[in-house]
Image (spheres, helix red, strand yellow):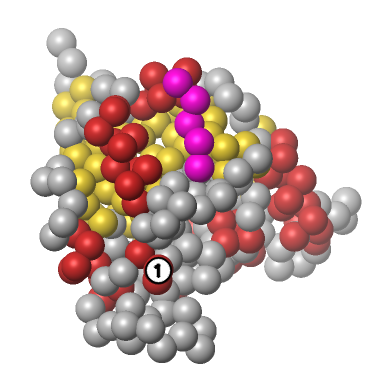
Amino acid sequence: MNQKSNLKVTFLGTGTSTGVPVVACDCNVCRSNDHRDHRLRTSVMVQIKGHNYIIDCGPDFRYQMIREKVEDISAIIFTHGHRDHIAGLDDVRAFNYVLNKTVDVYASEEVMNSIRREFPYIFTEKRFFGAPQLNFHIIDNNKFRVDDVEITPIEVLHHKLKVFGFRIKNFSYVTDASYISEEEKQKIKGSDILVINALRKSKHISHFSLQEAIDIIKEIKPRKAYITHLSHFIGLHKSIEQNLPENIFLAYDGLRVEMDTAD
């Protein structure tokens, strides 16, 4: 008999690489007083069975952890090696100090190379005092386990760069994508909740447009879908969301989504 286990997703950030508001911009989105239009760099926290799994830790990671009052993390899982997704890795050392623990990190070999370039002091033969203490695990496009949770990578293209989305039980998360093959779409189908990126309304070389994201959602048919990695070009949250299909929503920073999943 299957048992139900609660899975909770917290959107730590839902913005593109610049964040929103954008520095020096005075457009109506950047000047908005609606908190849903204020977007830190994209990341989510998946909570299941008392564990907190972080997908990507960008330059806003420290503040995101403080805002959500996160007291422990079990692992960080990386989608790709761009700075808006890895730049907060140094702030993991706070968990090292306070909890006296080493944090597990899961990343592809390509992402590991990016981390080595950005944080060479983590990898010195003689440990640099103050460097974050991390256990690195190399992943590829095959299922892997973190604790007793099975995670399925979903390989997508960010223009020509291979990026991993992830499926955890009936939750699928895809960011920084402009193309998903039919084979990889099959991994997503049957998801209860799908999170997918859309940078703006118009077409973009390395991200889905809003309509492209909607078309994929309609093809995959999740119960609910949330759109993330949004730029200020998307428009005001309130204006855009009221015109979306009834099961599609714009994600926003701090949004929490819960679902029951069968073990």
Residue appearing at x 88%, y 51% in the figure: 125
> According to the image, label 1 marks what residue?
233
Main secondary structure along the magenta-highlighted residues: loop
Which residue is located at x 50 percent, y 43 percent? 177
Quarter of the N terminus within the rendering: top left
Amino acid type for the residue under numbered disc 1: Phe
Residue closer to the observer: 204 or 142: 204
User: Image point 40% across, 71% down: which residue?
Assistant: 232
201 is within the stretch colored magenta? no
Q: Where is residue 60 in the image (x, y as percent from the top left)?
A: 50, 69
Residue found at x 11% / y 46%: 246
Spot occupied by residue 173 in the image (x, y as percentages of width and height): 39, 40
Q: Which range is magenta?
A: 178-182
In-front residue for pair 131/120: 120
Residue 103's place in the image compared with 139, above or below, is below
Task: Report whether 243 appears left or right of 207.
Answer: left
Q: Quadrant of residue 140?
A: top right
